[in-house]
Image (cartoon, helix red, strand yellow):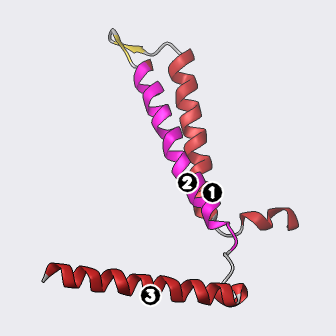
Amino acid sequence: MVACEGLSHCKLALAFAVMMDLLGGAALLVGVFVPLEIQGQDFGDLLVYTGALLVVMSLWGWVLWYSGNIEGLATSKEMGHIGSAVDRLARNLSRKIRTYRGHRGT
């Protein structure tokens, strides 16, 4: 079970991505290699486009799964004085911009 520890956070996104990849790949292969003609209409292109769309949709699942498995960034406590100095600088800059906009609008 140690080998599956990295999959523990976003199993639903992983399942979605794998399922869309399998369905999209199957649709692409069937659309390309199987002659699908019904009453003179060719439906191979429809399966190719559908398969490509499913594979593109699977990218969303992979992005969600990957971003859900990223470990958290360092908190401001872990960053020490640099984090608090950056926080103070950002607050002061934000206040100056806000007051500048307030004076300019009146």
The residue under the point 19% across, 79% down is 104
Tell me the chief SS of the magenta region. helix
**Which one is in front, 75 or 19?**
75
Quick check: 17 left or right of 41?
right
Residue type at tag 3: Asn
Disc 3 on helix, strand or loop?
helix
65 is higher (above) or lower (below) than 18: below
The x and y percentages for residue 95 are: 37, 87
The residue under the point 43% across, 28% down is 49
Return the residue at label 2. 61
Return the residue at label 1. 14
49 is higher (above) or lower (below) than 41: below
- Total labels drawn: 3
Residue type at tag 2: Gly
How dense is the environment of label 2, judged by Cα within 10 Å: few (below 14), some, or many (20 and up)? Answer: many
Disc 1 on helix, strand or loop?
helix
**Which one is in front, 29 or 65?**
65
Quick check: 26 left or right of 5?
left
- State the CA–CA distance, disc 2 to disc 3: 39 Å
- State the CA–CA distance, disc 2 to disc 1: 6 Å
Residue type at tag 1: Leu
Which segment is the magenta one?
45-71
- State the CA–CA distance, disc 1 to disc 3: 42 Å
Q: Which mark is residue 92?
A: 3
**Mark 1 touching mark 3, by CB under 8 A?**
no
Mark 2 or mark 3: which is in front?
3
**Mark 2 touching mark 1, by CB under 8 A?**
yes
